Image (spheres, rainbow, N blue to C red):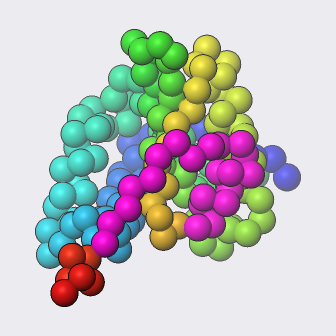
Amino acid sequence: MTLNLTLMNHQDFQRFLEIATVNFANDKVKNGSWKEETALEQSKAAFQSLLPEGENTENNYLKNIVLNEEKIGYIWYSINIKQVPNYAYLYEILIYPEYRGQGFGKESMRMCIKEINELGVDEVCLHVFGHNQSALNLYQQLGFEITDYNLKVSSSRFN
């Protein structure tokens, strides 16, 4: 069994974009940041802003996660080398549902972080939604430390 990270082509990128924009919109609705009616358009705008040249956007690495020639997910990170310490920001990792729970997410993350280190980058940062406990557990198992908390409460709770 061989797991690899390979660069996305345009067709791969289009599939990634379809899935990722919907997932991001759903997560932003779930955490209360966006309204359902406008979430998908906001998500598409966010991705367009971050990836103006699509899969060819400078300093962005969009990879397929490939198991024995079959694409089982994707990973996306960018590198910021203009700051000290320089860092990579991991925007997205997704293992397709039928491949989850088999360690592919963890192994893909290890491979990605190794690749980032080989590019001379000092740190890897990411964001995880509060409702995504399985992702948080994975990241902590890999040694990520929580650096911030964002909290909210409904003001009507105090009426």
Task: Please name whichever residue, 60 or 128, is drawn nearer the observer in this view of the structure.
Answer: 128
Tell me residue 54's x, y (percent).
Answer: 31, 38
Q: Is residue 82 magenta?
A: no
Location of residue 75 in the rendering, given as x and y in whole percent from the top left corner: 54, 46
Tell me which segment is drawn in magenta: 133-153
Q: Residue at x 14, y 68 (%)?
A: 38
**Residue 133 picture location, percent across and down:** 58, 67
Find residue 103 and report its image quarter: bottom right
Q: Nearer the viewer, residue 144 or 44?
A: 144
Q: Which residue lies furthest to the right in this view?
A: 1
Above or below 109: residue 120: above
94 to the left or right of 32 = right
Q: Residue at x 51, y 24 (%)?
A: 87
Residue 94 in picture, x, y percent from top left: 55, 57
Q: Is residue 152 visible?
A: yes
**Residue 66 visible to an observer of this rendering:** no
Rendered image quadrant of residue 23:
bottom left
Is 111 situated left or right of 122 in this image?
A: right
Q: How many numbered discs, if any?
A: 0
**Above or below, comparing residue 51 to residue 136 in the picture:** above
| Quadrant occupied by the C terminus | bottom left
Residue farthest toward the front in the current orientation of the protein? 158
Q: Which residue lies furthest to the bottom in this view?
A: 159
Residue at 36% over, 29% down: 56
State left or right for residue 101 relative to residue 112.
right
